[in-house]
Image (cartoon, rainbow, N blue to C red):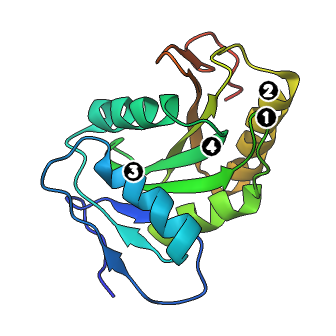
Amino acid sequence: MRTSDAKAPVFLVPTHTADVLDISDPNGDLAVLEKVQFARVVMQKPVYGKEFKNLTVAIEQIKKWLSLQVQEHVLCLYMDAALHPVAVTILGIGNISETRVNYYSIVQQAVLLNVGRIILFHNHPSGGVSPSDADCRMTGAVAEILRPFEIELVDHVIVGSDLRSFSFEKVGLLRK
C-alpha cells in the first residue's frame, strides 16, 4: 500500500479492503475526480491521485467537477496546518436534492490522515447556491463534531451547475 506525503494528495473512498488503484493523471483537469467517482461507486477501493499544486487549484478543480454532476455529491478536502491539500474524499452521492453523510467518517479520515483542517463541498444540481436549512444544520453539526478533535472546519462551499458558489466562511455563517 502506498502512503501519502506532502507532494502526493490521496483520494480516499470508504473501503474494507487494502487494495489500491493508482490513478496518477499526467493531464490534470477533471479526469482524476472522474476516476475517484468510478473507484468509489464501482470498485470500492481507495484511490491515489495526482498532486494539487496548491489550495486554490484544489478548490477550483473540485468546484468545476461538482458543477457537472447531475446528482448531489458531498466531498471533503483534508488539509494540513499550512492549508496544503492532503486528500479528497467523496462522502456521499445522493439524488437531485439531498445526500446523506456520515459525519463521523469525516473525523475518522481526518484523524487517520493526521490533518487539522477541512473544507466541505457539495453541489446543488438545480443550479442555485443558496444554502438550505439542512445545509446550515450540516455545517453546524460537522463543526461541533470536529471541535473536540481540534480539527477546524475552514469552509463549506456550495457549488451550482454554472460554477457559481456560496461560501459559508465568506458570508460569516461558519461558527468558529
Cα–Cα gap, marks 3 and 4:
12 Å
Contact (Cβ within 8 Å) of mark 2 with mark 4: no
Contact (Cβ within 8 Å) of mark 1 with mark 2: yes
Q: Give the crowd class for mark 2: few <14, some 14-19, many >=20 residues within 10 Å.
A: some
Q: Give the crowd class for mark 3: few <14, some 14-19, many >=20 residues within 10 Å.
A: many
Q: Which residue is mark 2?
A: 136
Q: Is residue 86 left or right of residue 17?
A: left
Q: Which residue is mark 4?
A: 73
The answer to which quarter of the image holds residue 135 is top right
Amino acid type at image mark 2: Cys
Is residue 158 shown above or below 71?
above
- Mark 3 or mark 4, earlier in chain: 3
One can see residue 26 in this view: yes
Amino acid type at image mark 4: His
Cα–Cα gap, marks 2 and 3:
26 Å
Viewer-nearest of labels 3 and 1? 3
